[in-house]
Amino acid sequence: MGLLRGFGLGSLATLTFTASTALAHANSTSHNSPGLPLAINTWGGPFIVATDAAYVALLEAQTSALDAVELGCSTCEANQCDGSVGYGGSPDENCETTLDAMIMDGTTMKSGSVAALRRIKNAIGVARAVLEHTTHTMLAGDFATDFAISNGFVAQNLTTLNSAASCAEWKAGGCQPNYRINVTPDPASSCGPYSPLPLNSSSRDYTSQLHSRGSPEGHDTISMVALHRSGVMAAGTSTNGAGRKIPGRVGDGPITGSGSYVDGDVGGCGATGDGDIMMRFLPCYQAIENLRLGMHPKAAAENAVKRMVRKYPAVQSGIVVVDKEGNHGGAGSGWTFTYAYRGGSMNETVVVTVPPLNDRVSDL
Ligand SMILES: *[C@@H]1O[C@H](CO)[C@@H](O)[C@H](O)[C@H]1NC(C)=O
Ligand SMILES: *[C@@H]1O[C@H](CO)[C@@H](O)[C@H](O)[C@H]1NC(C)=O
Ligand SMILES: *[C@@H]1O[C@H](CO)[C@@H](O)[C@H](O)[C@H]1NC(C)=O
Ligand SMILES: *[C@@H]1O[C@H](CO)[C@@H](O)[C@H](O)[C@H]1NC(C)=O
């Protein structure tokens, strides 16, 4: 890529089902591979522009799996997809939009990421620069911005009139909802500044107090896996995180094994959802290890989601899992998750709807 970096270039639906004989789960079905190359990512709707961009790029001989993931995620960063990726979305308590992104190479297991990135639109491009021009894995905050600028990215204001207005409305409404707990004044009715309340960690209430008050807003994110025609795989994630987050908050997106994960010998995974909870479980790492043990993609995804639902029954989560042949499946909880894919000779992207697992708590 040239010095003035920024966004990449502009940018048969036969569903077959296969009965899974995977460990333990009679009800798990995975979708058969449409063939390679393949692009697959969290969410349909406004996110299929990313699937199409990555898939079409993969048809060109010179596009690598990493290029396709970067291009797909950059497409959402540039056009904002549903507002959960890129500039002008999910303003924090100070009304600023900050970005998290990662990209991972399934051959070397190397990943590059940026966390709480300020003033740079093309977060996954900066993550790619971390991957390619450093031996680090993650850069964060203002210093990640300095790194981006020294790599040719342009600093810009990520606030839009819309994000500024939505943040002003939130403040006018008493900063509701927010992510504060065990503070004074009461965060359920007041804006900050807040001070911590003393807690008694021996009391029986202690663990229940540590649960968050629920999720203020949606948790959409783009996470994508690309399979090159040669079989080489890559994965990546880009997000503007949780709306109304406490400044400095980093979600699951840039965490290897949480936001996404890929081992080209086995498969890849992309995640979306309540990152504050999901990153405690590394669901994409878990799903790929499940694949390695012989589970089919859907069973691997369900097992990873169930581990979170057992501890956090209301968690909103969605993960899409694809094996190295391109067979795929998803699982989610707390909402109806969708994912999109296009591979082989498909002439358009197909969206798969995944009902929430916590509708069947008895199975957990
Ligand atoms: C793709 O092919 C199917 C089946 O031939 C057809 O129904 C559909 O309209 C095509 N879509 C596009 C975007 O060309
Ligand atoms: C599998 O799951 C679907 C959707 O949740 C449900 O309708 C169906 O009854 C289940 N089948 C079995 C065999 O459990
Ligand atoms: C960024 O843009 C917003 C919306 O246009 C504006 O309110 C704000 O003052 C700008 N910030 C800076 C530092 O220019
Ligand atoms: C903390 O809770 C324990 C168990 O309820 C209680 O015995 C103890 O007195 C409490 N400590 C304080 C400082 O309130």
Image (tube, helix red, strand yellow):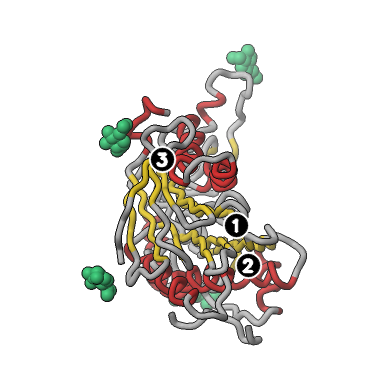
Is mark 2 in CB contact (under 8 Å) with mark 1? yes
Residue type beneath disc 2: Ala
Q: Earlier in the sequence, mark 2 or mark 3?
A: 3
- Please give the residue where the numbered disc 2 appears in the rendered image: 127
Q: Residue at (66%, 74%) from the top-left corner? A: 148
Task: Report ligand 1 position as a quadrant.
Answer: bottom left
Q: Earlier in the sequence, mark 2 or mark 1?
A: 2
Q: Nearer the viewer, residue 323 or 148?
A: 323
Residue 88 x, y percent position in the rendering: 44, 69
Q: Residue at (56%, 25%) from the top-left corner? A: 206
- Please give the residue where the numbered disc 3 appears in the rendered image: 20
Q: What element carries label 3?
A: loop
Q: Is mark 1 on a helix, strand or loop?
A: loop
Mark 1 residue's CB less than 8 Å from ligand 3 = no
Q: Residue at (59%, 69%) from the top-left corner? A: 66
Q: Distance between the residues labelled 2 and 1?
A: 9 Å
